[in-house]
Image (cartoon, helix red, strand yellow):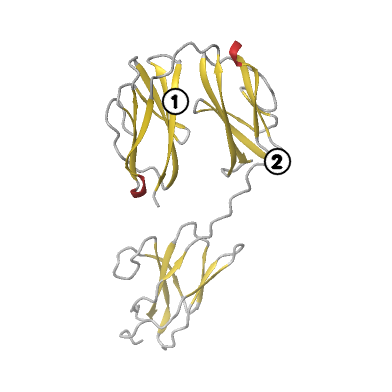
């Protein structure tokens, strides 16, 4: 084999949504050809000298190979080898990028209804939809997962088709229903409702202000929270609906806490909502809340 020339094969990729991706190339014509090595990389550069490659498979005198359907982007190249196990230079680079599945259609006619009497402290929430698909919902109370309900009518605080009421503490409560196709993680809709249980006699903070620090477009950011209220207050800080930490000292911040001015961090490209819920210190008496939504990355 002439080891001074570049490998002559041209890689071609074809794929099917129901099948797999296949590589094909022109056969070498040397009499001492023994077969081919196929290398793959998860990052570029991807070449014999890059150090990023790994040997995927060793083949005989064939001209196609089925790589399956990788779930992440991968890069490939081929070398030829002869009966003396001498290896050619690499072929041109081929990249496979998986297709992104289309999102499931949104839930039809989603509605939440407060039942009972929150002022008297006995209440609940019912969720309804005219969607005919097999769906389930995860129900959150004040940002924390409360139950999973698979049977309509979807409800809080009971599940599996039962409608009941309960008491959850004087003050403001937020109930959120997040719907999925049954047995999957494909979210198809969400809705929330906030109610005041009992009489509200506690005044709200004088002012609450949230400020973005850092640069979300560059993937490094945080939030500073301030209030002019002179009472001893605390805040629960939520990231995208999940409790991130409890903040007991001013300045209130995310992602840092305990009086440290907001540090900056990365939380994943896309939209993020940070919410501060304020309470009188060491109580469940909510006195105010504020949220801000930012988009990380371009």
- Residue 81: horizontal and vertical position, in percent? 38, 78
Q: Residue 195 occupies which quadrant of the picture? A: top right
Residue assigned mark 1: 289
Identify which residue is drawn at 59% across, 66% down. Answer: 16
Identify which residue is drawn at 69% across, 41% down. Answer: 134
In the rendered view of the protein, which quadrant contains the N terminus? bottom left
Q: Is residue 267 above or below residue 243?
A: below
Q: Residue 135 occupies which quadrant of the picture? A: top right
Q: Secondary structure at mark 2?
A: loop
Q: Is residue 122 above or below residue 109?
A: above
Can residue 121 be seen in this snapshot? no
Residue 131: give its label.
Answer: 2
Identify which residue is drawn at 58% across, 54% down. Answer: 102
- The residue nearer to you, when weighing 91 against 154, is 154
Q: Residue 163 occupies which quadrant of the picture? A: top right
Closer to the chain start, of discs 1 and 2, is 2
């Amino acid at each position: 084999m002439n080891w001074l020339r570049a490998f002559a094969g041209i890689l071609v990729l074809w794929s099917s949504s129901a099948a797999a991706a296949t590589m094909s190339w022109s056969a070498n014509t040397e009499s001492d050809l023994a077969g081919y090595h196929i290398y793959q990389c998860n990052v570029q550069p991807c070449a014999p000298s890059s150090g990023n490659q790994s040997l995927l498979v060793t083949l005989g005198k064939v001209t196609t190979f089925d790589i399956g359907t990788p779930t992440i982007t991968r890069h490939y190249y081929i070398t030829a080898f002869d009966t003396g196990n001498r290896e050619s230079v690499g072929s041109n680079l081929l990249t496979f990028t998986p297709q992104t599945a289309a999102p499931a259609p949104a839930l039809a006619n989603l509605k939440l209804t407060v039942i009972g009497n929150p002022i008297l402290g006995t209440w609940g929430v019912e969720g309804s939809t005219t969607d005919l698909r097999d769906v389930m919902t995860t129900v959150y109370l004040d940002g924390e997962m409360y139950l999973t309900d698979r049977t309509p009518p979807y409800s809080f605080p009971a599940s599996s088709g039962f409608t009941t009421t309960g008491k959850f503490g004087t003050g403001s409560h937020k109930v959120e229903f997040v719907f999925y196709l049954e047995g999957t993680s494909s979210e198809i809709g969400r809705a929330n409702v906030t109610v005041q249980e009992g009489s509200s006699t506690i005044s709200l903070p004088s002012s609450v202000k949230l400020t973005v620090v850092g640069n979300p477009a560059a993937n490094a950011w945080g939030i500073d929270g301030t209030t002019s209220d002179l009472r001893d207050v605390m805040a629960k800080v939520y990231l995208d609906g999940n409790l991130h930490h409890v903040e007991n000292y001013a300045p209130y911040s995310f992602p840092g806490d305990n009086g440290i001015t907001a540090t900056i961090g990365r939380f994943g490209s896309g939209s993020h909502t940070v919410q501060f819920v304020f309470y009188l210190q060491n109580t469940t008496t909510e006195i105010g809340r504020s949220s801000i939504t930012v988009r990380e990355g371009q």
